[in-house]
Amino acid sequence: MCRLFGLIANKEVDIRFSMLEARNKFKEQGRTNYHGWGIGWYEKGRAKIEKYGESAFTSNRFDNLVKELTSRIFIAHVRLASSGSRADKNAHPFLYKNWLFAHNGTINCDKMLRKLLIEPYSKNFTSEPIDSEIYFRFIIQNIEKEGDIIQGIKNAVKIVVPGASGANFILSDGESIYGFKYGKELYFLSRDSNSLSSTSKETGALIESKRLLDEKAVIIASEKLTDERWQEVKEGELIIVNSKLEIRREVLL
């Protein structure tokens, strides 16, 4: 079972606390999801990724990269392989054009390959390809066919979900972030000055420091990383967070 993390903020921020210092820090989740890790972000509006077929829990590069990066949008992933070998190229996130994508679950690879018939989506995979990158390309194929992100995602997941053990994903186009839940747990958190109540001293100090910097963010994750008031994404639901940090929830299934 892989673990997902996505963040969108009102300005460039770092993710050091969530990755390395939180009560349930993301790095710790690499202990049991040890087949790879990766982080995607946007630099001057362009999507970037760095990923490896090793455990984040034992990786010095994970710590160093987290300390180096700032961005308005992040997607991070730790992998427990259910499709494909343990290799750098099979780690998430995946990048296509300016899209970033990470997946938690297993889908029917053969079925999706039969549906992924249109070039360029069916060519030049960056993985073996594994089911997750095929899923990603199928979503983008549907989005571009429809000319509408939400309708494209809806069309894609209705085909992918039958026969899938898990179809959770986090996706970004560099402007907004999208989180879908099917088969695995998924939560979100809106972090601003109102989050100070009912938190530990450690988390409260973090939120207060971010308030002083006028930082606000929405986080989507497979697990609750802190003792803040996380909300559960419902089964078959898509959560959309735009550049203004406005949250929209759409039931797709």
Image (tube, rainbow, N blue to C red):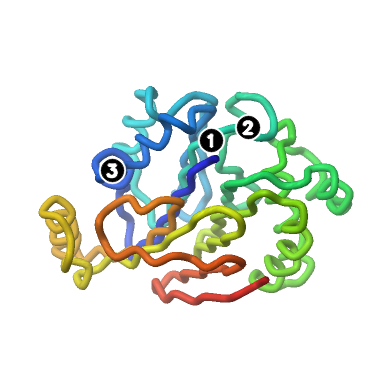
Q: Nearer the viewer, residue 42 or 74?
A: 74
Is 56 above or below relative to 229?
above
| Quadrant housing the C terminus | bottom right
The kind of residue tagged 1 is: Arg
Earlier-in-chain disc, 1 versus 3:
3
Residue of label 3 = 16
Earlier-in-chain disc, 3 versus 2:
3
Question: SS at mark 1?
Answer: strand
Q: Which mark is residue 140?
A: none
In this picture, residue 35 sits left or right of residue 16: right
| Disc 1 from disc 2: Cα separation | 9 Å
In this picture, residue 40 sits left or right of residue 63: right
Question: Around disc 1, counting alpha carbons within 10 Å, would you say few (fewer than 14), some (14 to 19), or many (20 or more)?
Answer: many
Disc 1 + disc 2, Cβ < 8 Å: yes
Task: Tell me what residue is drawn at x 54 percent, y 58 percent.
Answer: 172
Is 164 above or below relative to 145?
above
Disc 1 + disc 3, Cβ < 8 Å: no
In this picture, residue 205 sits left or right of residue 160: left
| Quarter-of-image position of residue 88 | top right
Task: Tell me what residue is drawn at x 48 percent, y 57 percent.
Answer: 186
Residue of label 2 = 90
| Quadrant housing the N terminus | top right
Is 145 above or below relative to 46?
below
Q: Residue 75, position in %: x, y?
A: 47, 49
The kind of residue tagged 3 is: Arg
Question: Around disc 2, counting alpha carbons within 10 Å, would you say few (fewer than 14), some (14 to 19), or many (20 or more)?
Answer: many
Question: SS at mark 2?
Answer: helix
In this picture, residue 116 sits left or right of residue 62: right
Question: SS at mark 3?
Answer: helix
Residue of label 1 = 79
Earlier-in-chain disc, 1 versus 2:
1
In this rendering, the count of numbered labels is 3
